[in-house]
Structures are given as structure tokens and as C-alpha cells.
Amino acid sequence: MRAVYFNSHGDLEVLKVGEFEDPKINRGEALIKVEYSSINRIDTLIRRGYPGINISLPHIPGVDLYGKVIDIDDSSDINPGDFVIANTVYGCGHCNFCLEGKEHMCEQWKMIGFHINGSHAELIKVPSKTLIKVKGDGEKLGVSPLSLSISWNSLVTIGNIRKDDFVLIHGASGGVGTFSIKIAKLFGAKTIATTRSNEKAKILKSIGTDYVIVSTEEDVKDRVLEITDKNGVDVIIDYVINPTLPISLDVAKTNGKIVIFGFLGGNTFAINWQKFYLKHLRIYGIHNSSKLELKDAIKYVENGEIEPYISKRINLEEVKEGHKIIENNDIIGKISVKVK
Ligand SMILES: [Zn+2]
């Protein structure tokens, strides 16, 4: 099969495209013919070598997956010929979190395209328990899993957003940001998005963001307080931390929630803890979501109520270009990877 892979960690040039041996499935696994995938920031972090987690080389990247089941060695309701996506994370299957269906919280969690080979290949084998049967537009479904699951977990599971709540998304132009804007709209919440670029601001506005703040031109704290009549924001989504977290502490409503799923600006950062506890704030750390959360969320992509924003379309030979766009922070919405 044709696949994108790397033999060593490093810059863009370690990414190769070539022939790879077809995967062979074992008990509990499924073989999928990949039709669509996407590029996520984590693909670039894995390529560079993710701190603290070793992967076997050569490695095929690619976390998101939409495709057709070719073979499955499991007694499940999924059969060859079905179209599927996969929840990107899975657990040991027997700890208390796994028994509750929260495999993303399993201490032994593993991720597709990370701990095992990914979807930037014509074929992929995955644990069959990760699969969700889907119908509809393959490209839209294929760019959704990781970004959608993080956004859904942040706003719906943790945020419990309601009509007229304010949601603030720092650096909102990427996959999670654009999905979060769509989810917030679906629940009737009002969205405030920040970006450093006027060009991205225009796109954020065009996809329905209520308020867009260009952080290089306006004071984010002042503007958010102005927009919310000094009441502050109910839920804040942040993957930057430095310099955004102090702003979040200032603009969060009393008892508000801050959800963190990354640390683009550095992973150690001092904050004013007095502001934190005097406002009864809650900071949540997450990665991924449960399969059930993704199953709930993907229904809205299937029926068109959540429309992924796809800014670029590439094929396997161009995956390197996708990594470059993400590493240059030029990403807007999702990049789709057509494999079929
Ligand atoms: Zn487990």
C-alpha cells in the first residue's frame, strides 16, 4: 500500500511517501480502506518526537480516519462494506475508566496515528472497538474526529453550554476553534474568538462567530469585558496558555470554566492563584473524548447541522505541505487529506 511515513524524528524532510507492507489484522481488529483523513497539530508533534512517549519506527502518521471496512475479526455490529470513522483514542478495556466508557481517561490510553500506525495510508488496522458506523459526506466526516471530539468534550460535556452563554476561544482559527464555534452556535451560545490575523478574522466572522477580536490590534481583556457588559465569559477554550491564561482569569465569569488541551506558548507558566480561587474558577485539562461523545457529536456532521470548515484539500503526496501549514500557524479550520 502507499503510505506517508518517517524513519526518524525531525523536521519536515523526514516525511516520506512510498510503498509499505499491507497491515494484517488480529483478533479484535479491523482493516479499513482509508478514503479521507486530515492533518492535526499532533501529527507534527509526533513527527518531531513527543516528549515522554516512544513510538516504534518507521511510523505512519494520521489520527483522523474515514473509510470502508474491508475485514473485521470481531463479533460486533460492524461488517465489511460499512463506512466508519474511529474514535482516535482507546484504553486497556478493563480499568474502571474503560468500564465506564471513558477510555480516553485510561492510564494506558493509546491513540491512532500515535502509539499505532495512522491513517495517512491506503489501509489502516485499528482496534474494532474504536469504530463508529457513519453515513454522509466522507470528506466532512474524515476531517472531524479529533477536533470535533475535543470541542464537544470542552463545550458540551464539561462546559454544559446553554443558550446565551458566552464562549471565548483563544486562537480560534484552527480545527478545534472552528468546530467549537459551530457547536456553540448549535446550542445558542454566543461566541467570542481571538486571532492574531485580520485575514483569519474575516473567515471566523464568515463562519458565524459573533465577536472576533484581533489580538494584535485590540486589548482582548477590555474587549471581552465590553462585549459581555463586564459580566465575563462562561466557558473559555485555551490551548495557548502563555500569554492567554492571565487574560482568561480576568475575563472568566465567577464560577466559570477554562478548558485546556495544549500549551502552544510553553507548558510551564505562572498565574495569579488569588484571582483563580476568589472567582471560584475551574480549570479542566483534557485530551480527546470518549467514543460515546464522538458518536453523539458526529450525528450533527452527518445531518449537516455542524459543517466542518475545510480550507485546503491535499493528497498523500502533499501531507508534508499540511504539516508545514500547521507549523507556520497558517491553519484555518481543517486540511482534508484525500486518500482514495
Ligand atoms: Zn483502561
Image: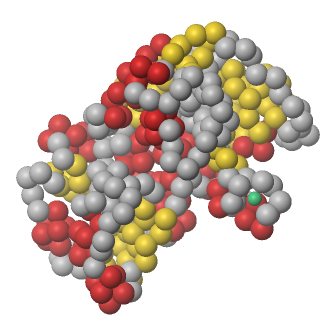
Question: Along the horizontal axis of the image, is 26 left or right of 240?
Answer: right
Find residue 126 and report its image quarter.
top right
* Residue occupying the far bottom of the picture: 278
Q: Quadrant of the C terminus?
A: top right
Q: Residue at x 77, y 26 (%)?
A: 31
Instruction: Name the image colouring.
Output: secondary structure
The mark total stands at: 0
Q: Residue at x 43, y 16 (%)?
A: 318
Question: Along the horizontal axis of the image, is 101 left or right of 297?
Answer: right
The x and y percentages for residue 233 are 30, 72
Whether residue 16 is visible: yes
- Split into quadrants, the picture shows ligand 1 in the one at bottom right
Whether residue 182 is visible: no
The x and y percentages for residue 58 are 62, 24
The x and y percentages for residue 251 are 24, 73
Vertical arrangement, residue 279 with respect to residue 165, above or below: below
User: Which of the two residues, 241 or 335, is positioned nearer the viewer here?
Assistant: 241
User: Which of the two residues, 136 or 272, is positioned nearer the viewer here?
Assistant: 272
Q: Residue at x 30, y 74 (%)?
A: 271
Question: Along the horizontal axis of the image, is 126 left or right of 47?
Answer: right
The x and y percentages for residue 123 are 69, 20
Q: Quadrant of the N terminus?
A: top right
Question: Along the horizontal axis of the image, is 247 left or right of 214?
Answer: right
Find residue 6 and report its image quarter.
top right
* Residue occupying the far left of the picture: 217
Q: Residue at x 11, y 62 (%)?
A: 219
User: Which of the two residues, 284 or 142, is positioned nearer the viewer here?
Assistant: 284
